[in-house]
Image: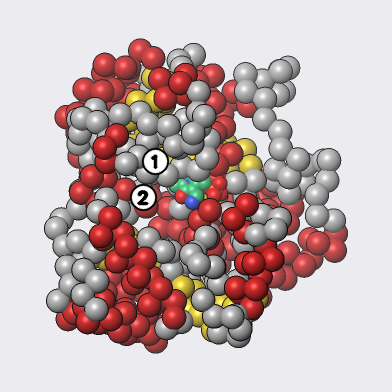
C-alpha cells in the first residue's frame, strides 16, 4: 500500500458504493487494483502515470490493443449517426455475413451483449431443439455466469468427486438444486469416461458445451481423439455439440473449430468481434437456429436484448474482424510461439518448475512442469496459486499486465521487441521467486 497512490485513493472511494470497491470480480486485486487511465496500441497507462505493456487486453477481447485508429473511426462515425435504435440496422447483416463466411459451424447467428448471454441462449436453443433437459460441460471450464454453464467451476478439490464422473457442483451459493441435477460434468480429454457419461445420460442430454482450448482447464487443447469421439457420439445420440469460441475466435479466421478440425452444431462467439465494445453471439446450423425465428409466430425460444446488435458494437466489430487477415493471424501465431519458447526458457534458467501452454496468441503460465492434459493435472495447489499471484505482482511492478492467474493474450500492435520485453521481465520476476524461495 502506498498512500500517495491514486489507484489506492480510487479504491477507497469505490468501497462506499461498490461491494468491496469492485464491480467485476475478474479485475479485483488485493490490497487494491491498479486503475486504468488510457491506452494506445499494446500499452496502457494507469492513473499514477505508470506505463504497462498490456498482455491481458481486456481478458482477450482487444485483439488490436487499445484505441486502434480504424476501430475508433468506425465507432466515432456510428456514434454521430446514433448508437442504438428500436429497429434493425444494416451493420448486423454485414458482421453476420463475415462470420458465416469464415467459421465452418456458423450458418445463422443472433447477436447478444456478452458471451454469458450467448452461452445461455445456446443452451436454451439446444433444450428447445431437442426437447431434452440436461446439459453436459467440461469439468472446471468457464463459460460465463449462466447457472448451468458455471456449474463445477472452481470447485474445491474436496468436492471434485470421482475423476471419471466429476461432481456437478454449484458455483454460486443459492443455485437451485434443479440446476446441478441437470448438468453432467465431463472429464476433459478422457475419451472413455466421457463417452460412458454421454451414453448413460444420452436420452436426456440436449447439448455438450465445450471450449476447445479451455482457459480455466489449463489452456490445453482438446485432443483430436477426444473431439472425434465427441462429434461421433453426440451425432449418434442426437445431442447438439456446442463449441464456445468466445475466447478462441482469436485463434484463426475459423476459430478453434477450424484449427482443431471439428464442426459443431452451435457456436458461441464474443470478445474480439465487438471491436472493443460489448458483444456476443449464438450461432450455428440454420435448422437449429430456427428456434429463434419469429417469422411464423412466437418462436420456440424468444430472444430480445435492448442493446443486442447495437450498431456501435457491430461496426467496430466488423472493422476489427476485417483487420484480422492472414498476415495478422500469422503474426499473432509467431508471437505466441516466441513467447511460449521464451517463457519456458525463463523457467529453465531460473531453475523453477513451470511451463507455458496455449495456442496462437493465447498463453498461460503454470508453476508445474509435468505434462498437462486434464483439469485436475493443471489445477494449481494453494502454494502454486500463491506463487503465481506473487509472480503476477512482480510482473505488474515491472510494467507487464497479465491475469493474476497467469493468462496472457497478445495483440496485433505488438512487435518482436515487445515480446522480448515480456520474456525479459518474466526472467526478472522468476529470479525474485527463486531468491525469496517462494516455491
Ligand atoms: N465463454 C468463455 C469461454 C469465456 O472465456 C467467457 C468470458 N471470459 C465467456 C464465455 C463469457 O463472456 P462475457 O464475459 O462476455 O460474458
User: Could you tell me which residue is drawn at 50 percent across and 56 percent down?
Assistant: 26
User: Could you tell me which residue is drawn at 27 percent across and 50 percent down?
Assistant: 379
Callout 2: SS: helix
Callout 1: SS: loop
Residue 151, horizontal then vertical, whole percent = 42, 34
Which is more foreground, mark 2 or mark 1?
1
Crowd rating for badge 1 (residues with CA inside 10 Å; few <14, some 14–19, many 20+): many
User: Could you tell me which residue is drawn at 32 percent across and 17 percent down?
Assistant: 202
Residue 116, horizontal then vertical, whole percent = 55, 42
* Quarter of the rendering containing residue 344: bottom left
Looking at the image, is 169 positioned above or below residue 260? Answer: above
* Along the viewing direction, whichever of 103 and 210 lies nearer the viewer: 210
Question: Disc 2 designates what residue?
Answer: 216
Kindly tell me whether residue 307 is visible in this rendering: yes
Distance, label 2 to label 1, CA atoms, is: 8 Å
* Numbered circle sitting on residue 153: 1
Residue 94, horizontal then vertical, whole percent = 66, 50
* Along the viewing direction, whichever of 171 and 115 lies nearer the viewer: 171
Mark 1 CB in 8 Å range of ligand 1? no
**Contact (CB < 8 A) between labels 2 and 1?**
yes
Q: Which quadrant holds the C terminus? A: bottom left
Looking at the image, is 379 positioned above or below residue 143? Answer: below
Amino acid at each position: 500500500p502506498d498512500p500517495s497512490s491514486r489507484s489506492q485513493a480510487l479504491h477507497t472511494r469505490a468501497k462506499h458504493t461498490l461491494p468491496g470497491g469492485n464491480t467485476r470480480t475478474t479485475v479485483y486485486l488485493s490490497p487494491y487494483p491498479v486503475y486504468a487511465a488510457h491506452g494506445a496500441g499494446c500499452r496502457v497507462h494507469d492513473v499514477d502515470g505508470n506505463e504497462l505493456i498490456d498482455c491481458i487486453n481486456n481478458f482477450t477481447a482487444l485483439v488490436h490493443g487499445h484505441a486502434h485508429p480504424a476501430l475508433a473511426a468506425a465507432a466515432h462515425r456510428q456514434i454521430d449517426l446514433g448508437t442504438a435504435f428500436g429497429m434493425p440496422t444494416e451493420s448486423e447483416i454485414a458482421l453476420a455475413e463475415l462470420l458465416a463466411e469464415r467459421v465452418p459451424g456458423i450458418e445463422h447467428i443472433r447477436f447478444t451483449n456478452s458471451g454469458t448471454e450467448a452461452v445461455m441462449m445456446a443452451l436454451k436453443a439446444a433444450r428447445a431443439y431437442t426437447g431434452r433437459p440436461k446439459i453436459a460441460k467440461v469439468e472446471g471450464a468457464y463459460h460465463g455466469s449462466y447457472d448451468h454453464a458455471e456449474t463445477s467451476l472452481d470447485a474445491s478439490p474436496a468436492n471434485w468427486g470421482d475423476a471419471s464422473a466429476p461432481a456437478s457442483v454449484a458455483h454460486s451459493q443459492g443455485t437451485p438444486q434443479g440446476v446441478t441435477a441437470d448438468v453432467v460434468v465431463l472429464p476433459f480429454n478422457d475419451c472413455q469416461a466421457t463417452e460412458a457419461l454421454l451414453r448413460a445420460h444420452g436420452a436426456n442430454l440436449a447439448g455438450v458445451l465445450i471450449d476447445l482450448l479451455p482457459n480455466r482447464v489449463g489452456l490445453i487443447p482438446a485432443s483430436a481423439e477426444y473431439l472425434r469421439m465427441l462429434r461421433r457420439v453426440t451425432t449418434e445420440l442426437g445431442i447438439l455439440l456446442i463449441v464456445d469460441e468466445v475466447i478462441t475466435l482469436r485463434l484463426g479466421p475459423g476459430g478453434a473449430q477450424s484449427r482443431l478440425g471439428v464442426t459443431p452444431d452451435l457456436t458461441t462467439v464474443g470478445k474480439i468481434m465487438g471491436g472493443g465494445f460489448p458483444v456476443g453471439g449464438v450461432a450455428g446450423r440454420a435448422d437449429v437456429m430456427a428456434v429463434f425465428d419469429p417469422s411464423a409466430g412466437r418462436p420456440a425460444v424468444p430472444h430480445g436484448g435492448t442493446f443486442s446488435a447495437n450498431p456501435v458494437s457491430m461496426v467496430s466489430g466488423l472493422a476489427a474482424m476485417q483487420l484480422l487477415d492472414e498476415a495478422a493471424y500469422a503474426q499473432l501465431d509467431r508471437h505466441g510461439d516466441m513467447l511460449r519458447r521464451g517463457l519456458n526458457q525463463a523457467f529453465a534458467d531460473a531453475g523453477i518448475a513451470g511451463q507455458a501452454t496455449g495456442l496462437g496468441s493465447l498463453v498461460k503460465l503454470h508453476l508445474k512442469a509435468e505434462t498437462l492434459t486434464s483439469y485436475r493435472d493443471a489445477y494449481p495447489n494453494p502454494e502454486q496459486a500463491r506463487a503465481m499471484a506473487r509472480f503476477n505482482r512482480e510482473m505488474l511492478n515491472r510494467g507487464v499486465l497479465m491475469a493474476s492467474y497467469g493468462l496472457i493474450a497478445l495483440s496485433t500492435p505488438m512487435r518482436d521487441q515487445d515480446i522480448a520485453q515480456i520474456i525479459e521481465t518474466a526472467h526478472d520476476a522468476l529470479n525474485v521467486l527463486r531468491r525469496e524461495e517462494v516455491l
